[in-house]
Structures are given as structure tokens and as C-alpha cells.
Image: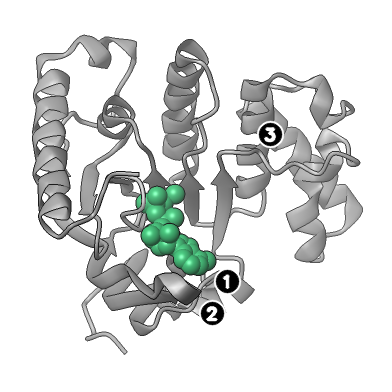
Amino acid sequence: MNTHDDHTHAVHVTDVSMVFNEGEAGEVAALDDVDLVVEPGEFVSLIGPSGCGKSTLLRVIANLLVPTAGEVAVNGKPAEQARLDQEYGMAFQKSGLFEWRTVNKNIELPLELKGWDKQRRQARVREMLDLVKLPDRGANMPWELSGGQQQRIAIARALAAHPPLLLMDEPFGALDEMTREHMQSELLQICAATRTTVVFVTHSIPEAVYLSDRVVVMSAGPGRITEIVSVDLGRNRDEDTREDDTFYKKITEVREALRGSEMSSEARGIEDR
Ligand code: ADP
Ligand code: MG
């Protein structure tokens, strides 16, 4: 296992490699010797060209994929134990709500899996609907909600069982720009209120900078971390933050880091897909 530190990391990825065998196309090094530490309460984004291994890294942390080499710990537990203990919630680009279940029943699902009794489940669902500002939509079916509302319900479901960690893979990718910015602000408020640690995959530089304490920049062929940009914008970010000089500076810094990572990908013969 990893060396013993004096406190428990929310996520600790050590020397992780992931090789996929793609049949005739041969082997793909989706991740090559990746190290990453995320501290409790931190918001960390993964950004990089398509195919650089962002989703793979997230799935490895979630123990949905077992890496070819290396170690993953979540809240000090091996990844598999963390998954079994529901140490994290997940949200993806497609909300993943069950179409045949009401909003209430969707949010209740992880609580049923945890064996909570009905009364406790219903109280928690009401709390979560308030948190995502949709207090009156519990009886609706998912298709009766807008894309942004469905994404809020998906976040409510991911957080219902109080997981200390939230793993998100381009959750706002399908939303229009205004809804997307609104959702970003709400996510920050929700994370502050619940003190949840977040690992967030995105293609958008402004989104990564607005949300994150640190932006992890990756390159492809093989998937590696090339740079980590700290975003010292404080924790109380609001719509004015988007006009802040530091915000623009950080966007430039991440863009330059990305450019460097794409050039190093090209140098290794990887086309941007
Ligand atoms: P990203 O999310 O950054 O776009 P992915 O993590 O999805 O990148 O993919 C990284 C690389 O691994 C890509 O080359 C992709 O084709 C490959 N890959 C991802 N998942 C699989 C899989 N299940 N089987 C084979 N190859 C895969
Ligand atoms: Mg992806």
C-alpha cells in the first residue's frame, strides 16, 4: 500500500497505469504511471485533449476499472472497499436517471441500497430536493424536467447517502452556456454546504478554473499528468469571479499548459480525436 502519511487523503492514486487491449489496434496506454493526491474538501478538475484518459482515471478511482498497475485509495481504503462502502457518488454527462422511477424514487435509490427505512429515506429526499432547489418536483417523472433540472436531480441522488466524495464526468457538457454557468455556481454552493470533495472531468477551461482549487492538466499517448495549476481565487466565488483579473490569468495559464500537453501528445504521434 501507499506510504503512511499523518492524515488520510480523500483520493490517493499511486503509480497507476491502465493498458487496454483494443484487438487489432493493439494496446492503448490510457494511463501511464499517474500519481494524484486529492485532499478532503478539495475541488480538483481533470482537463486534457480527448482520449487522454480523464474518464479512465475517474473510473479507476471509482473502482469501475481495475488498473493494470498501481494503487488507488479513497478515504484511506482500497478502491474496492471504498466502492462497497459507497464512499463516493457519481454523476455523468447523461443524468442517468431511471426513466420509470419518479424523481423521489430516483433519489431514494442509494438510500434503499444502504438499507435506510422509509421514513428516513423520505426525509432525506426532501432535504436533497431543497438543496438542489427543486422542492416541488419529487412526484415528477424525469422526462418532465429540463436538462438542467435532471442534472440537479442526478447530483441530489449522488449526494443523498452523504458520500464524502463526488466523482463527476462532464456532468454539464450537454447544457446550454447560461444553464451551465448557473449549475456551476450551484455545485459550488452545494459542495460548500456539504463539505464534499470533488473530482470533476471537463473539456471547458473556464469551467475548470471557476470550480477548482487545482486543475490537473493531462496529455494523451500515453495518458499522463503534465501539469497541475493551483487556482487561488478563494472559496467564495460568485458570478463576479468570472470578471476577475485572476480568473482570466488562470484561464490563460491552463490554456498554455494544455497547449504544451497537446504538443507533447502530437510529438508522440497522437492525433487529436
Ligand atoms: P478521455 O475521457 O480523456 O476522453 P478516455 O479515458 O475515455 O479518455 O480514454 C483514454 C484512451 O483509452 C482512449 O484511447 C480510449 O480509446 C481508450 N479506452 C477507454 N476505454 C476503453 C475500453 N473500455 N476499451 C478499450 N479502450 C478504451
Ligand atoms: Mg471522457
Q: Is residue 38 left or right of residue 133?
A: left
Question: Residue 226 at what x, y percent from top left?
Answer: 14, 55
**Residue 8 visible in the current orientation:** no
The image quadrant where one finds ligand 1 is bottom left
Question: In percent of the image, x 28 and y 25: which residue is there?
Answer: 206
Q: Earlier in the sequence, mark 3 or mark 2?
A: 2
**Residue 146 visible in the current orientation:** yes
Front residue of this view, candidates 29 and 135: 29
Query: Callout 2 environment at 10 Å: few (<14), some (14 to 19), or many (20+)?
Result: some
| The label number, if any, that marks residue 83 in the structure image | 1
Question: Residue 212 at what x, y percent from top left?
Answer: 28, 38
Identify the secondary structure beneath mark 1: helix
Question: Residue 61 at what x, y percent from top left?
Answer: 44, 67
Identify the secondary structure beneath mark 2: helix
Structural distance between the alpha carbons of marks 3 and 2: 26 Å
Return the residue at label 3: 153
Return the residue at label 2: 80
Check the picture and name the quadrant holding the N terminus: bottom left
Question: In percent of the image, x 74 and y 56: which residue is there?
Answer: 110
